[in-house]
Amino acid sequence: MESAQPLDASQLRYQYTTTPREVPDAEILAKNKQTICTDHMIVASWDVNSGWSTPELKPYGPFNLLPTASCLHYAYECFEGLKAYRGHDGKLRMFRSDRNSQRLLMSSERISLPKFDPIELEKLIYTLVSVDGARWLPKTRAGDFLYVRPTIIGTDSQIGVAKPTAALLYIILGYMPRVDQPVGGKRLMTNPDDVVRSWVGGFGYAKVGANYGPSLQATEAAYRQGYHQILWLYGPNGDCTEAGGSNFFVVWKRKDGKKELITAPLDDQLILDGVTRRSCLDLAKDRLEDEIEVTERKFTIGEIQEAVSEGRLLEAFAAGTAVSSDS
Ligand SMILES: *Cc1c(COP(=O)(O)O)cnc(C)c1O
């Protein structure tokens, strides 16, 4: 008999902090190099037999994990990143959080972590944002935002490689270091020939921790040479995929004179299906239909070089929730 409990936001238990922390002021935030989390987090644990526990809202703080926890050994970890904005009308808003919730489910399944109803996750996100939003993102901070990080990790004590039998879902909320737009735009360096971010048959399309750590060696080398990010190319033709951890777009004039907004396709599962990416494509299709053609297809670094040499390159930009900027 199936008795595993589903994730159920309506059962949420509240344990409020008795020692609220100081909310950083604008001056501290401007200099801040770390994530400063709010007073609370939401956690729900999962067990293969009993399913999801009652979710709890509780004071932000460290976890108890055994050194054998499977996430620490085999990268059973996936996450999401979205923002809660304080509107100029005083309201708190999220942007397309349904997409992030569905994407976390997809990432979780890709690495054998548990399923859940994405609508329940969305409700939990809203609850955390509304509990901590009043104090941490007050109406005096109109236009500002808090970063929301839902995460799932494998927690079972398992040194053998096996499908996790226990997991933890948690949601934290906080201020990330401010990312200033570099003066003169972003400089991208293509990856070294012997390094790829993702590959066909891999997991580049999932937001799993295993995609990020290994990319930093190339990224650091790019920083040292005065670049801001890696432009990840793939395959013998040098297909453009992503710029760092964000989706990459080019606006150019095609040889037939037509203006085109182009970005890499999703079907080969090399890139992340960004919420910002989709929004840029939808907006351009909707509002700029007469001016510009919107295309999702493979395009190469060679095509960009050719466009540059023929004076047809109009713009290039990277887009993602954490940072959206021109280059
Ligand atoms: C998160 C992420 C993006 C951007 O996705 P958004 O949903 O737009 O924030 C793009 N590429 C990678 C590799 C990412 O991890």
Image (spheres, rainbow, N blue to C red):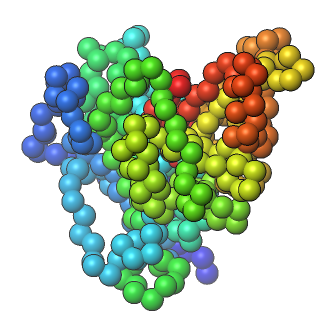
Q: Which is nearer the eye, 261 or 327?
A: 327
Q: Which residue lies furthest to the right in this view?
A: 256
Task: Answer with the quarter of the image where residue 45 lies.
Answer: bottom left
Taking depth in this image into account, of 198 and 186 the one nearest to the observer is 186
Position of residue 68 relative to residue 107, above or below, is below
* Residue that appears at 49% across and 32% down: 187
User: Could you say which quadrant of the image residue 81 lies in?
Assistant: top left
Q: 22 above or below 258?
A: below
In this rendered view, identify the residue nearer to me: 57 or 206: 206
**Taking 42 as reference, is 255 above or below it?**
above
Does residue 48 appear left or right of residue 102 in this picture?
left
Q: Is residue 112 left or right of residue 303?
A: left
Q: Please say if 263 is above or below 45.
A: above
User: Residue 158's x, y, as percent?
Assistant: 40, 85
Which corner quadrant of the image does residue 93 belong to? top left
Ligand 1 image-quadrant field: top right
Where residue 291 appears, as percent x and y from the top left, is 79, 12
Q: Where is residue 179 in the image (x, y as percent from the top left)?
A: 36, 30
- Horizontal side of 20 relative to 173 (left or right) equals left
The outermost residue toward the front is 309
Residue 12 in sight from this viewpoint: no
Instruction: Give the number of marks.
Output: 0
Q: What residue is at 27 percent from the left and 72 percent from the top? A: 65
- Give the residue displayed 40% in from the left and 20% down from the top: 183
Measuring from the top left, give residue 135's x and y in whole percent.
23, 28
